[in-house]
Amino acid sequence: MNKFLIRLLINAAALFLAVKVLEPHILMQNDAWYAYLVLALIFGFVNAIIKPLLMIASCPMIILTLGLGTLIVNTLMFLFAGWLGNIINIGFTIPENKYLYAFLGALIVSLVSLILNRIFAPNKRESR
């Protein structure tokens, strides 16, 4: 349970940073602190359930692009999490279909969560 809460807070912080850095281009519907927690929960659900299926379906594209296709999959997961959040009025929108900002947002979330997971998430050796 402790690992889950740490990862949830890390994803919430990464989403918060991505939205704040790209704020004129990514508009959050509800800017309260709990909205980022719920959005992080949705983001984790999307990455745990839908992303593996999409990775398998897009395997030829990923092989052809030498792995760069995973960036497109991450962008789609970022957009999908925002869309699911919009259903319950806590998501974000990207106006005028500027998908470059969704790509940058997904990239920021990936990098920030990678760094924060290295700093705060418990190692596998420590949990034994």
Image (tube, rainbow, N blue to C red):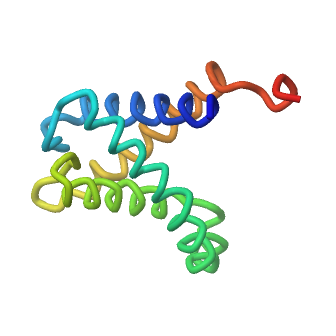
Q: How many marks?
A: 0
Residue drawn at the location 62% of the way across and 35% of the way down: 1
Residue 26: x %, y % from top left: 19, 44
Left or right relative to 97: residue 115: right
Determine which quarter of the picture holds residue 84.
Answer: bottom left
Q: Residue furthest top?
A: 119
Front-most of residues 72 and 19: 19
Give the residue drawn at x 44%, y 39%: 109
Q: Position of residue 27 (x, y in %)?
A: 15, 43
The relative height of residue 89 versus residue 72 in the rendered view (above or below) is: above
Seen at 39% across and 63% down, the residue is: 76
Q: Quadrant of residue 70?
A: bottom right
Q: Is residue 38 above or below residue 32?
A: below
Quadrant of res 67? bottom right
Going by the image, does 70 lie left or right of 12? right
Name above or below for residue 82 compared with residue 113.
below
**Who's the residue at 17% across and 32% down the image?**
31
Query: Looking at this rendering, what residue extends furthest in the front direction?
Result: 1
Q: With 57 as the anchor, is 78 left or right in this view?
A: left
On the rendered structure, is 74 left or right of 99? right
Q: Looking at the figure, which quarter contains the C terminus?
A: top right
Instruction: Provide residue 50's location: percent of width, then percent of height.
Output: 50, 67
